[in-house]
Image (cartoon, rainbow, N blue to C red):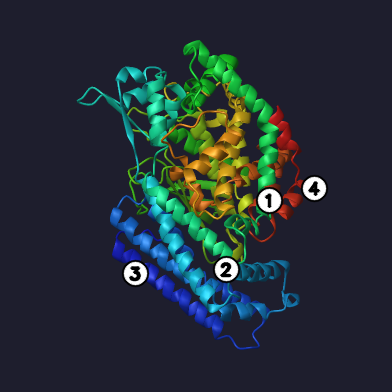
Amino acid sequence: METLFPADVPTFRAACAADLDAAKEALAALEALPAGASYEEVLRAYDAIGHPLNRSSGLAHLFFQVHPDEAMREAVAGIEQEISRFGTELSLHRGVYERLAALDPADAPDEVSRRLLEHALRDYRRAGVDRDDATRDRVRALREELVETGQAFSRNIAGDVREVAVDPAALEGLPQDFVDAHPAGEDGKARVTTNPPDYLPIMKFCRDRDVRRRLHLEYNRRGAPDNFEVLDQLLAKRHELATLLGYPHWAAYATEDKMIRTAEHAGAFIDRVSGLAEARAAEELAELSARMQEDEPGAELRDYDRTYYTEALRRERFAFDSREARPYFPYAAVRDGIVATASRLYGLEIRRREGVPLWHEDVEAWEVLEGGEVLARFYLDMHPRTDKFKHAAMFDLNSGLEGRVVPAACLVCNMPKPSGSDAGLLDPSDVKTFFHEFGHLLHHLLAGRHEWLATSGIATEWDFVEVPSQLFEEWGNDVGVLREFAKHHATGEPIPADLVERMNAASEYGKALGTRVQMFYAALSLEYYSHDPAGRDTTEVMKEVRSRYLALPYEEGTSLQTAFGHLDGYTALYYTYMWSLVLAKDCLSAFGEDLMDREVATRYRRKILEPGGSRDAEDLVRDFLGRPYSFDAFEAWLAA
C-alpha cells in the first residue's frame, strides 16, 4: 500500500489513531499466545506490533519538519508524542520482555531470528524494563518529555530565518543568478537570509567582509535565545535518564550499542583523527591568513573569512572557481543525472510518477522498479520554504517487508529552485549533498525486502549509517559520471573533463582544516553528553572545546549550539560522520578505477545495502572487502 498523504488534519488523526489501535491489538495478540507457542510464533507476534505504525510514525516525523500548514505541523507533533508514548510503554512492558526472555536461542530457525531476539532483549534491558516501578515510571516520563523538548529544539531552529540588509553593490562578485534573485527593495537594500541557498554563496563569494561577518553572526545565533533553555533541558533529561538506567552519563548509554562501543573509544577516535589532521590544518590556516593579508593588511583571519579565502586559494592554486562549474549543474539535470547513475549502477528503472497527491507543489513522487516489479517509492522535497527543515536529510516513511510493504522515503533539501529562465544552478557542494542524501535513500530502499520489520531499511548500527551516503558522494566526483549529465544550462555542452579534474583537486584543498572543524563538532557533542550538565554553561563549554580544535577567534554573542540540530538527533554521536568516512574510503578501494563496475556494485548492493540490520556492520564490511575494515585508505586520503 502506498504511503498515505492526508489532505487534512482530521484525516491524518483518524488514520494514526487506527494504526495505534492496531498496534495495541497486535500487542494483545502476543500476550494471548499460549504458553507452548514456538520461538518463531512468539517472535513474529512481537515483530508484528510495529507493523501498523510503520507508516504513520515516519510520516508524522516528516510532516513535523516539512509540512507547509502550521496546523498540520502542530497536529503531527502531538501524533509523534502519542506514538512515542506507545513505544515507551512497549519498551517497558515486562510481560513482553519475559515472554521473549523465555525463548531459547537454540530454537531459532536461523541466525537472523536468533540475532533479532538477542537485540530485542538487549534493547529491553537498555530501556529499563528490569528496574523497579518508580524508576520505570520516571523513565517513561523522561522519554515522553524528551520528544516534546526535541520538537521544541527543532522548531526553534526551523522557524528562525534571519536576514541581513545589504547594499546591492556588496553582492558584486556573486553569481549573476544570485544577484538577480536578490533585487533591491523600496529602501534600496537587498536582503540575504540565513537559509542555505543564501548563506553558502555569501560565505564563498561576497567580497564585502562586513556582509560576511553580519550574516555569519546571524547564522550562528539561530535558535537563540529560546534554545539555550531547551538545550539545557535536553542535556539534563538525557543525563537523568542515563543515570537511572545505570550509566555514568548519556554518552556511555548512547555509544554502547554502536560499532564504537564506548564513549572513551569515541573520544580516542576523535583525538586520533584530529591528530592526523593537526599539522596540515595549521599549514592551511597559515596559508589562508597570508592570502587574506593581501586584501586586508593587518586584519586577523576570522570564521567568516575561512570559506571565502579557501575558495580564493582554490581559484588561484588550481585554476578553479566554483562559479565556473555552476552553469553545468542546473537542478533538474543534476536530479535526473543522479537518478540515471543509480539506475545504471544497480540495474534499476527509476521513473517519475504523476498525479500523486502530495503536501506541496514542489514535491515530486518517484518509484523504483526491477524486472517490472515496483521495489520502492520515494519523494523529493528539495527547495526552501518558510518553517521547513533547514538542512538536508533522508526521512524514511516506511520500511519494506517482503511481499507485503513497499519501502518509501523522502529526501529533504534546500537547493535553489528553478523558476522561469532561472535554471536553479547548483554549487558543487550542493551536488555533493544531493549524491550524499541519495546514498541514504538507496540504502533504505534496497534494504526493504526483509522478512522482519526490525531488520528492514537502515537498521544497522548508527555509526555505520553514513557509510553508504558518504561513499555515493564519490560518484559525484567522477569525470565519466558527471559528463553524462552535467551539461551547460544554456549551450548543452558537457562539463569539460579538465574542469572536473580542477574541481576535484580544488575540493581537496582545506580538507585537513575541514576535518578539524568536523572533529570540533564531534568533540562538542560528546563533551555535552559526557558530564552532568548541572551548572554548566553550554556557551562556555562550546568555547573551551572550540579552542582545542580551531585556532580562530570565537565570535562573541554567537551560539553555535542553539542551531546545532544534531545535538538532539545524534546527541553524543556526531563522531559517526567521520567514523563512517573511514569505512567509506575503505569500501571505495574495492571499486578501483571504475566506479560504474556493475560486478562490484552488485556485490556492494548484496553485501552492504540489502542486508539492512540483519547482520553486524563489521561483518557486512568484512564480507564485502574480504577482510576486516582498515584505516589505511582514510589515512592515505587525509595525507594526500
The kind of residue tagged 1 is Glu
Q: Which of marks 4 and 2 is in front?
A: 2
Left or right position of 21 against 139 = left
Q: Which amino acid does the dot numbered 4 rest on?
A: Arg
Q: Mark 2 points at which residue?
A: 127
Q: Which residue lies furthest to the right in this view?
A: 627
C-alpha gap between disc 2 and disc 3: 29 Å
Q: Quarter of the image for the C terminus: give it.
A: top right
On the image, the x and y values in percent for residue 41 come to 62, 79
Q: Distance between the residues labelled 3 and 4?
A: 51 Å
The residue that mark 4 highlights is 627
Q: Which of marks 1 and 3 is nearer the N terminus?
A: 3
In front of the other: label 2 or label 3?
2
- Asked if residue 598 shows in the view, the reply is no
Write down the residue under mark 1. Answer: 264
Q: Position of residue 396 (x, y in %)?
A: 50, 55
Which is nearer the eye, 332 or 465?
A: 465
